[in-house]
Image (cartoon, rainbow, N blue to C red):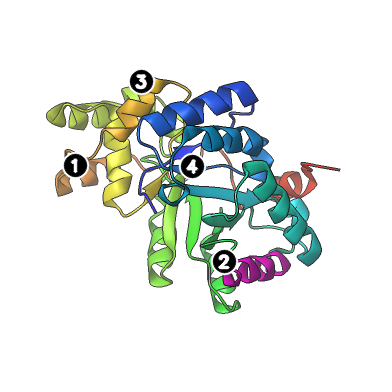
Amino acid sequence: MPQLGFGLLQIRDSVICERCVEDALNEGYRLFDTAAAYFNEEAVGRAIEGAGVPRQQLFITTKLWLQDYSYDKAQWAFQASLKRLQLDYIDLYLLHQPFGNYYAAWSVLEKLYQEGLAKSIGVCNFTPERLVDLCLNSEIPPMLNQVELHPFLLQSDPLRVMREYRVQPEGWGPLCEGQKGIFQNHILTKIGEKYGKTAAQTSLRWNIQRGVVVIPKTVHVERMKENMNIWDFSLSEEDMSQINSLDSGESEIIDFHSACTAKWLNEFAIHE
């Protein structure tokens, strides 16, 4: 699994999405992260089909929405995603949210993994207690947990738990979706200047050095190039410590401990 990939959240327009995947492939990206709830799997599939990149070089992630967290619905939803993506298998299949009947859904993911239809399986947005509970009560524990991870949200304790249970962390929103002035942040900018890098590159490198897979999203080719160009420098322990000091301890994007969040996600339907 590549440690740097391309996120496709909020790129719903099919023309723009297809172009972005094509551009990202041309820039060397091979990990693409989509979901049934992103409504762009078909565009991703068309771009991949027309790119001419050997399938074995690609790492495609998609996700099961909690509306389909039942044994029968989960099997149907997986096949629907497979068809939209024009693929024979998925490299990584995730439960998208930590609510609903995710134990029934997880049993389907275990079956898909055993059948080779999903090469790896995991979860998304699972808080430590839910992740540990699933790890301890499943035949095949989650292999990856995709959560919000950026300099303003370190998630030190969740990362410790993931490492303890041998679950790979993957960071969505690694650039905080452009919020909190991350691209102009004084600490990130000053550290980056030492290496001839931007605040964004510094942020991505920080997560990479923490062992986190990152999937930044952009629709601009120049940003795709910038985000990819992070392999020729390393941050010092002092740099890492300074970036750690930016932690606010709470999300600016979504709170998975909130009753309102649980209600909203359970009520959000992606199909009839």
Magenta stretch contains residue 111: yes
> Which of the 4 image quarters holds residue 23?
top left
Residue 240 on image: x %, y %: 22, 45
Q: Secondary structure at mark 1?
A: helix
Span shown in magenta:
103-116
Left or right for 103, reference 195: right
- Kind of residue at badge 1: Asp
- The image quadrant where one finds the N terminus is bottom left
User: Mark 2 or mark 3: which comes first in sequence?
Assistant: 2
Residue for badge 1 = 239
Gap between marks 3 and 1 measured at Cα:
26 Å
Q: Earlier in the sequence, mark 4 or mark 3?
A: 4
Alpha-carbon neighbours of circle 4 within 10 Å: few (<14), some, or many (≥20)?
A: many
Q: CA distance from mark 4 to mark 3?
A: 18 Å
Q: In the rendering, at what x and y percent does residue 179 appear?
A: 46, 28
* Circle 4 residue: 32
Kindly identify the amino acid type of the residue bearing the numbered disc 4. Phe
Mark found first going from the N terminus, 2 or 1? 2
* Residue 162 at x, y percent in the picture: 43, 64
Q: Is residue 144 above or below residue 232?
A: below
Q: Is residue 105 left or right of residue 243?
A: right
Q: Which residue is mark 3?
A: 222
From the viewer's side, name the closer residue of 174 and 21. Answer: 21
Residue 18 disc label: none
**Callout 4 secondary element:** strand
